[in-house]
Amino acid sequence: MTAIVEVNGLNKYFDSLHVLKDISFEVAPAEVICVIGPSGSGKSTLLRCINFLEQPDFGSIAVNGVKVEAGGSGREYKQKIHDLRLQTGMVFQSFNLFPHMTALGNVIEGPVTVKGMPIQEATEIGAHFLEKVGLGHKQDSYPSRLSGGQQQRVAIARALAMQPKVMLFDEPTSALDPELIGEVLGVMQQLVEEGMTMLTVTHEMGFTRRFAHRILFMNEGRIIENGPPDQLFDNPEDERTKIFLGAISRLGE
Amino acid sequence: MTQTTTELQSQADQIQSLKRRKQQRFRLGVNLSYAVLFLLLIYAFSGIKFNLFGLQFSTISLDTAFIAENWYFIFNGVWLTILLSVLSIALATVLSLLGGLGRLSKYPPAYALATFYISLIRGTPLLLQIIFFFLALPQLGIRLTGLWAGVLALGLNYGAYMTEIMRAGIQAVDIGQREAALAIGMNQGQIMRRVVLPQALRLVIPPIGNQFIAMLKDTSLISVTGFVWELLWRSQKVGRANFRSLEALLIAAVFYWIITILFSIVQANIEERLARGVRTT
Ligand SMILES: Nc1ncnc2c1ncn2[C@@H]1O[C@H](COP(=O)(O)OP(=O)(O)OP(=O)(O)O)[C@@H](O)[C@H]1O
Ligand SMILES: [Mg+2]
């Protein structure tokens, strides 16, 4: 198997705080990875380093053959980071839709502004992706007129419209009311079934158990478990994993 | 059980209506006071004579014939005053946007230039700046009409003060907006133009409205050039010519006051509309 994502020797500091410690792992095409772990363990930072929203201090990231080493500078380096970002789509906990643009405007912003696609063509693509997340009828709505679940689905469509090779989700359902979580997970399930490569930080253990091919369990900036869900849920290697999973499942009750 | 709930409900209603009545009484009191103040003001300028403890007093007496004859001439300065304000605020908005971007820039010359501009303008009097553009520049071969000297000076001056507004507006746009834009591959220029500025400009409309209202009054400083027929210049001209400066200046003051109140109402409306349209995320 050739990996589509390769993270190698990744280290990240916030001032003196060592947030990611020697992280290395690979993701195969169409693989679904769920990243779990206690708050502050570095899950978001890991995801954000993969598309360089955070600059890692050491190590390298490669996505779909675009490899970027930590700590470069200059025009060429920026171009490389840009190329890397085009390989990835990201979905945020707080949606971060552009409030001054309609749903369709949000989705075509990338294709038009970044790729220079003609509006007409972008609109077709945009409509297609909004349809896909079940919001074809909301094209002209502004984000403020949409529910949280609808906003997050538009955000997913916005990421997909750039036709990335890998999707990064950072707690996509954490800001949602319980009754809206299902619609977002539904869209994510659809992506899994279509063979999208996905890295998801989530506390949705139902989704994780059902769809994750592999789970990364993080603690204090390290990956301390890396295996299929059955193995992790049924006999975790590390004591801390047990405690964490215990706490999570009690929360779920 | 239901009894207590309804009782509680009616208690809450009572407190609510008590509060409302209190508010209404306050509003009524304020409006009555306005009316009294207004009548007093009219009385003070009515020229009525009265006797107090055997002494003869008179309120201020105005030359009504002069007022009737000249108010329209002065009133015609309103349009120029508004025009000067509009031109100056437009220039100030552009400059403050550049200044605000400069203050946020990581490019040293841009930051330095913006800081230098703000310091220089804030460190010198506005009146001096206006006179400078009108009187000093011709010595360098740059001849500006009173109007353009005034607009340039006011625009530069307000621009410097408004950089802080712009900087704050740009910074107030949620960081998540930039991150989402970066994630779809936008570069810094695209993010500014397409994502941050449209949102920042919405945020700064109310404070810019306030600056505009302040500007309406500061345009009067341009009268010192002697060539711009705005409100104050016109009132000084007819006032001096007829030895009726009291009346002439009062007329100008009333017009400034009225246009300030009118624009404040417009401003409040815009603010309210923007507030209603506020979008979360
Ligand atoms: N921009 C930042 N500046 C300084 N410290 C930061 C910054 N972002 C995160 N941190 C710190 O880095 C550590 C890891 O944060 P991160 O957000 O990656 O954790 P997380 O696993 O995603 O947690 P959560 O489950 O709460 O989202 C935390 O201690 C956090 O306080
Ligand atoms: Mg996080």
Image (spheres, coloured by chain):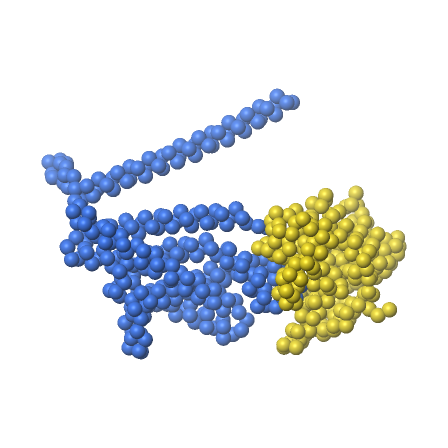
Chain colours: A yellow, B blue
Q: Is residue A123 left or right of residue A238?
A: left
Write the residue at 86% across / 53% down: A233
Residue B49 in view here? yes
List x then y, in percent, for residue A76.
66, 77
**Residue B235: quarter of image:** bottom left
Q: Which quadrant, please, contains the N terminus of chain A? A: bottom right
Q: Residue furthest top?
A: B3
**Residue A54: quarter of image:** bottom right
Q: Is residue B224 left or right of residue A190?
A: left
Q: Residue furthest front?
A: A120
Q: Which quadrant, please, contains the C terminus of chain A? A: top right
Q: Nearer the viewer, residue B153 or A38?
A: B153
**Residue B194: quarter of image:** bottom right
Write the residue at 63% across / 62% down: A119
List x then y, in percent, for residue A191.
78, 56
Residue A94 in view here? no
Q: Is residue B268 left or right of residue A190?
A: left
Asked if A34 appears above or below B11 in the picture, the reply is below
List x then y, in percent, for residue B2.
64, 22
Asked if B52 appears above or below B176 in the picture, the reply is above
Write the residue at 46% across / 53% down: B206
Write the residue at 63% across / 65% down: A118
